[in-house]
Amino acid sequence: MQETGLPGAPWRKSSYSGNGPSCVEIAPVNNAIATRDSKNPTGPVLLFPEVSWSTFLRSLR
């Protein structure tokens, strides 16, 4: 699902991102995880169900 904005969401960037400009930010929203491009904070937002996000993170380990 694609949304725009989500003002007031508690966005955070990974500590592994450093100070680089190309980062992904995430925020918990209801029962989903929102993601956005840090270079475009007012641009599109992708929402993933929490279970899908957890599966994605486990696959990275």
Image: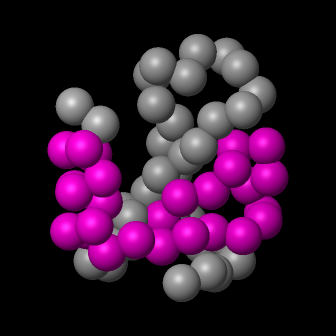
Side of 37 relative to 39 (left or right): left
Write the residue at 67% across / 16% down: 19
Q: Which residues are magenta?
A: 34-59
Relative to 1, residue 46 above or below: above
Q: Quadrant of residue 48?
A: bottom left
Residue 39, horizontal then vertical, whole percent: 79, 43
Q: As rendered, which of 3 and 59 lies closer to the eye?
A: 59
Q: Is residue 59 above or below residue 49?
A: above
Q: Quadrant of residue 15?
A: top left
Q: Does residue 37 belong to the magenta stretch?
A: yes
Quarter of the image that includes the N terminus: bottom right
Looking at the image, residue 39 sits to the left or right of residue 51; the answer is right
Residue at the (59%, 43%) spot, across then down: 24
- The C terminus lies in which quarter of the figure? top left
Q: Is residue 8 left or right of residue 10?
A: right
Does residue 21 sit above or below 52 in this rendering? above
Q: Residue, x 64% and y 35% (percent of image)?
A: 23
Tell me residue 20's x, y (percent): 71, 20
Q: How many numbered badges does the structure rendering display?
A: 0
Instruction: Name the foreground residue: 49 vs 8.
Output: 49
Q: Is residue 7 visible?
A: no
Q: Determine the image quadrant of residue 22.
A: top right
Residue 27 lies, in percent from the top left, at 44, 57
Residue 42 is one of the magenta-drawn residues: yes
Give the color scheme: rainbow, by chain, secondary structure or one colour: one colour
Can residue 40 be spotted in the picture? Answer: yes
